[in-house]
Amino acid sequence: MPRPASGKDVLESARRSLLKARTVSELRQAPAAYIMVYTAGVCLFVPGTLLTALGAAISARIGALFTSGLVR
């Protein structure tokens, strides 16, 4: 017979669910934000290498979220 969930377990589960939902929501908005930032950077004569490096750094962070199992 499974043990009853304690208040701490319920709170931890709710926290993880909220974090996952927030992360997934942000991931859906990321491509549009990247395109807007890249477009503004080009208009302001920011070097493309810098913009691409920033995109790679952000992508690596997002990849780490998936690898850690936080987002599935």
Image: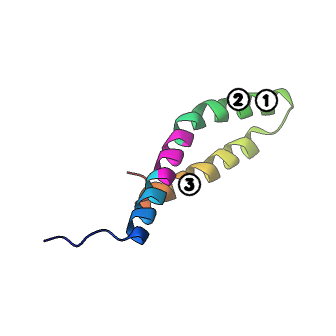
Compared across the picture, whether 39 is left or right of 26 comes to: right
Which residue in the protein does label 1 denote?
Answer: 40
Give SS at disc 2. Answer: helix
Q: Mark 2 near mark 1, Cβ–Cβ under 8 Å?
A: yes
Residue depicted at 48% across the width and 59% down the height: 15
Is residue 8 rendered magenta in the image?
no
Residue depicted at 70% across the width and 29% down the height: 36
* Amino acid type, mark 3: Ala
Rendered-image quadrant of the N terminus: bottom left
Label 3 neighbour load within 10 Å: few <14, some 14-19, many 20+: few
Q: Earlier in the sequence, mark 1 or mark 3?
A: 1
Q: Where residue 47 appears, x then y in whole percent?
A: 80, 39
Is residue 22 rendered magenta in the image?
yes
Which residue in the protein does label 3 denote?
Answer: 60
Compared across the picture, whether 7 is left or right of 25 comes to: left
Magenta segment range? 18-26
* Amino acid type, mark 2: Met
